[in-house]
Structures are given as structure tokens and as C-alpha cells.
């Protein structure tokens, strides 16, 4: 912005400045009837400058009064040519420098009204520097602890029954499609449809559990099979429940949407089984194209962060766990020390797991399938309570729970609290299956850990209303990441070692 001689100023515009020569020569309008300024009174240069300064402050980012344009001494042309300005009239001492009430950027009233990207970058730099030193110190003290058979070994070839079981899971969606085709053709009645879907979904869970328990497979292979089993089960339930609801609406005389029609498509089912969602619908929002370069970059990140997870597990977590005792037996202070020592590397692994699966892998899958809705998570790190965390960190599962468990309970006049408990019960059962079956150890630690979240939901909701949001957020971080997960790791490890010791 240019500030002209004789006290004249230029008003800021979208491109940084404007010529207001006419402002210097204009007189205010007179109005004898309403008591405004008479013709003989002119607006002073200080008044004009004060008004323009206020406009500049309100349009911050378009012009900068202190230095948007280069200020240079003028030889006498008034600063109207070449972008020059007469510094004699720039920021006169008589112009007020303080015009309104403002808060400091880090005050409690203003801290969340601006970007903190620079502080975030500082935290990342400090985090990388500190952990790099710790990694170097660990390598110098203990050496390279990663085993060559971490990713693959000759014993992994014994897991071929689990691999074949994974491939055979595709039979169950085909069976569900056949049932829907039969009911579309009026070959079977509605009670028979429900019975057949129950048989299909139960068999889909019990068959992989049987294979995993019968085979002496590696833990990682068993976890992969059980995760895939749970995903297919959730998809089958959504497929059957959604089609049942569509049939009900299509056959209803007073249906809300007259355009609802029931049809069965093998193509839509196949797309649903591959898509990064657990909620079935005949069609999904689609993205226009596949960005091949973007997919390649995400794959590279996936490989890097997966390797980083493996490094932390082998170099840090395994030695800590092997050198620990059962956390519920022996010295209490020793158990607390082991849990706290394990909490930091465990937190790193868990955050990397979240980033790899929910951000990288699901986005890669969505890009390859042109799946448009990619809200796989929300800002769960800002969760004000444990309930907020479970509603935001895993959106595919949350949408499934709301759609097929929570609101169906409410529609059947089940109170809200029992509906919440039932949703957590379903989640707890599948968490226990994914851990206990591969370990062949049914101690219910994962089940109890999930069910323990129910009282925490109500406790943190109360604390949020009573003391504010940050209290619930800190309790969530402590109970879930600092205490809960490391405790479960130690419990399962020592129970597994005790089981192997008794068997040998």
C-alpha cells in the first residue's frame, strides 16, 4: 500500500493498493437539516489515515501497512510513480498504534482460534531428534536385535491351511447372494431367509476358528485370518440386514421413499466385499479416476511405516516383554515400571498401525476401487471422552454398529444404556476372537478390556461436563494408551509363555 504525500493515503484493494487522489480533494457532504458537518469543515488527514488504518487491519493478508510494498525516499514526486512513497507521512507519531482489545496468541481465549503448524513442526523435529538419539544409543548398547525370520521363515509354509481357509471365505458371500436370489424369485419365505443367513454367518465364524485351533500356525498368520473372518462376518450381516430392510420398504404400502426397489446384483455384492466399508448399499459415491502416482507414493509410505513398526517391535518391545514378570504377580512397583517402560514403544506401534491401516491402506483400496467416501476416521486424538474416541477412531465399525446394532435396539424400545452395552459386547467378542484364537488362550483379557470402556464412557462424560474437555481427553490417553494396551500385552505374553511351559 502506498501512503501519499500531503497526508493522503491509498486504500487497500485486492491487488495490494489503489489510487485515492480524489480522496485528498473531496469535501464532506453537508446537511444543515440533520446536524452533519458544514461545507466549511473538511476531514483532517489524521482522520482519513485513521479510517484507512482500520480498514487495513480488517483486511489483513491483502495489504500490510508496515511493509507490503517497498518504502523508499522520494525525490519530490509525491511517491506517485514507481511505487515510491514519502516516508515523512508513514506512521506519524500522532496515529494511534492500539485501537482495539486483543488477546495474546497463546492465551486460553485465543489459542484455538489460529493455526499452530509451526509448533507442530517443532514437536516433530524434537521428536525425531530425541528418538534418533535413543535408537542410536540402543543399537550401540544392545546391537541389532531384529531376527531374520520376523517377516518370513520356512515355518511359515506350515500355515498353508490358514491361507486356504482365507481363500475359501469367498464361498459365504456367494451363499448369501444365492439366498437373496431365491427370496427375490419368491422361492423361499422370509423366516427361511433369516434362518439361512444365521446359518451362513455362524459357519463363516466357526470354520476359521476351528482351522486356526487345529493348525500349529504362527501368531501373525492366525491374527490375519481372524481379522479377515471378522470383516467378512460384519459385511455378511450388513448385506442380509440391509436387503431385509429394502424388502420391507419395497413391500410396504406407506413406504417413505417410493423409489425404493429390491433387486439383487452379484456385481454390487462383489464390489461391496472388496470396498473399504462394512455397510452395504446397492451403490456408493465414486471418485472420477485412479491416481496412479498417488497410489505409488502411498504404497511406499506403507512399506516404510510397516518396517518401522517391525523395528520397534523387535528392537524395543520384545526385549522389554521377555525381561518382565507377570504384571499381576510379584512386586507391584516392578509391574508398574514395566508397564510404563513398555507404554512409549507400544504407543508408537499403535499410532503407526493406525496410520498404516486406516489412512494408507484404506485410502489405497478406495483409490483402486474409486470409492468416494473416505471418512475412515475423524480427529479422535481430540476426543473429549472415551465415548467420543470410539465414535471417531474407526468410522467403518462405528457406522456398522450404529446402523445394525444401536438404532435397531432403539427402534425396539430398548433403552439407550443397554443398547450401548450391547454394542460394546459385540465389539468385545470380536476383539477376544482376534487375539485369543491365534494365541489358543482364552483368558478374556481383551474382552474385559473392551467392556471396561463402558463405565469409562460415563465417567469421562461426567468429567467433561463438570471440569471441561481436556480432563476427559487426558484420561482417555492414559487409560487406553499408557496403561491399557501395555498391560494387555504383558498379560497375554506371560499367560502364553506359562501355557507353553506347561505343555512342554
Image (cartoon, rainbow, N blue to C red):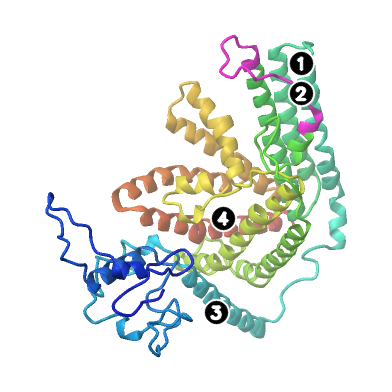
Depth check, front residue: 360 or 387:
360
Q: Label 2: which residue?
A: 264
Q: Label 1: which residue?
A: 184
Q: Label 3: which residue?
A: 130
Which numbered mark, 3 or 4, is in the foreground of this view?
Answer: 3
Q: Is residue 234 above or below residue 436?
A: above
Q: CA distance from mark 3 to mark 1?
A: 63 Å
Upstream in sequence: badge 3 or badge 1: 3
Q: Which numbered disc covers residue 488?
A: 4
Q: CA distance from mark 2 to mark 4?
A: 44 Å
Q: Is residue 214 above or below residue 407?
A: below
Answer whether labels 1 and 2 touch (C-beta < 8 Å). yes
Q: Is residue 411 above or below residue 477?
A: above
Majority secondary structure in the magenta region: loop
Residue 421 on image: x %, y %: 48, 35
Residue 235 on image: x %, y %: 69, 35
Q: Which numbered disc covers residue 55?
A: none
Residue in the image at 46% along x and 31% along y: 418
- Magenta stretch? 248-269
Residue in the image at 56% along x and 44% along y: 447
Upstream in sequence: badge 3 or badge 4: 3
- Give the structural element (helix, strand or loop) at label 3: helix
Amino acid at each position: 500500500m502506498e501512503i501519499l504525500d500531503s497526508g493522503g493515503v491509498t486504500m487497500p484493494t485486492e491487488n495490494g493498493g489503489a489510487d485515492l487522489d480524489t480522496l485528498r480533494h473531496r469535501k464532506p457532504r453537508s446537511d444543515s437539516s440533520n446536524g452533519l458537518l458544514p461545507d466549511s469543515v473538511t476531514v483532517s488527514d489524521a482522520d482519513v489515515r485513521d479510517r484507512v488504518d482500520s480498514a487495513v487491519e480488517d483486511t489483513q493478508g491483502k495489504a500490510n501497512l508496515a511493509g507490503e510494498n517497498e518504502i523508499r525516499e522520494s525525490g519530490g514526486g509525491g511517491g506517485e510513480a514507481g511505487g515510491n512513497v514519502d516516508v515523512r507521512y508513514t506512521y506519524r507519531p500522532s496515529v494511534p498504534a492500539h485501537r482495539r482489545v486483543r488477546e495474546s496468541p497463546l492465551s486460553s481465549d485465543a489459542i484455538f482460534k489460529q493455526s499452530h503448524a509451526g509448533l507442530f513442526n517443532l514437536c516433530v523435529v524434537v521428536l525425531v531428534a530425541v528418538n534418533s538419539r535413543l535408537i542410536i544409543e540402543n543399537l550401540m548398547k544392545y546391537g541389532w536385535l531384529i531376527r531374520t525370520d520376523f517377516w518370513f521363515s520356512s515355518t511359515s509354509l506350515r500355515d498353508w491351511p490358514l491361507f486356504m481357509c482365507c481363500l475359501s471365505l469367498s464361498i459365504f458371500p456367494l451363499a448369501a447372494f444365492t439366498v437373496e436370489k431365491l427370496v427375490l424369485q419368491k422361492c423361499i419365505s422370509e423366516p427361511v431367509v433369516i434362518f439361512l443367513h444365521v446359518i451362513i454367518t455362524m459357519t463363516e465364524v466357526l470354520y476359521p476358528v476351528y482351522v486356526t485351533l487345529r493348525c500349529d500356525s504362527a501368531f501373525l498368520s492366525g491374527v490375519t485370518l481372524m481379522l479377515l473372518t471378522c470383516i467378512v462376518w460384519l459385511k455378511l450381516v450388513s448385506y442380509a440386514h440391509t436387503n431385509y430392510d429394502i424388502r420391507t420398504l419395497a413391500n410396504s404400502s406407506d413406504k417413505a421413499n417410493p423409489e425404493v426397489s429390491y433387486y439383487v446384483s452379484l456385481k454390487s455384492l462383489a464390489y461391496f466385499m472388496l470396498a473399504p466399508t462394512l455397510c452395504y448399499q446397492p451403490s456408493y459415491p465414486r471418485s472420477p479416476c485412479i491416481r496412479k502416482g498417488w497410489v505409488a507414493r502411498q504404497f511406499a509410505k506403507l512399506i516404510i511405516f510397516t518396517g518401522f513398526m517391525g523395528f520397534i517391535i523387535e528392537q524395543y518391545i520384545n526385549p522389554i516383554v521377555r525381561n518382565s514378570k507377570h504384571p499381576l504377580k510379584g512386586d507391584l512397583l516392578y509391574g508398574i515400571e514395566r508397564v510404563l517402560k513398555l507404554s512409549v514403544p507400544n504407543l508408537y506401534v499403535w499410532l503407526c498401525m493406525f496410520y498404516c491401516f486406516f489412512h494408507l491402506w484404506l485410502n489405497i483400496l478406495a483409490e483402486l476401487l474409486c470409492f468416494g467416501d473416505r471418512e475412515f476416521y475423524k480427529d479422535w486424538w481430540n476426543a473429549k471422552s472415551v465415548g467420543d474416541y470410539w465414535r471417531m477412531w474407526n468410522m467403518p465399525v462405528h457406522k456398522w454398529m450404529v446402523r445394525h446394532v444401536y438404532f435397531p435396539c432403539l427402534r425396539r424400545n430398548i433403552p439407550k444404556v443397554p443398547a450401548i452395552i450391547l454394542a460394546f459386547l459385540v465389539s468385545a467378542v470380536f476383539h477376544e476372537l482376534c487375539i485369543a484364537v491365534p494365541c489358543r488362550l482364552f483368558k478374556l483379557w481383551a474382552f474385559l478390556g473392551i467392556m471396561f470402556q463402558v463405565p469409562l464412557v460415563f465417567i469421562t462424560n461426567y468429567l467433561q461436563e463438570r471440569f471441561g474437555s481436556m480432563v476427559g481427553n487426558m484420561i482417555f490417553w492414559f487409560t487406553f494408551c499408557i496403561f491399557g494396551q501395555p498391560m494387555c500385552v504383558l498379560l497375554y505374553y506371560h499367560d502364553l509363555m506359562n501355557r507353553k511351559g506347561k505343555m512342554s
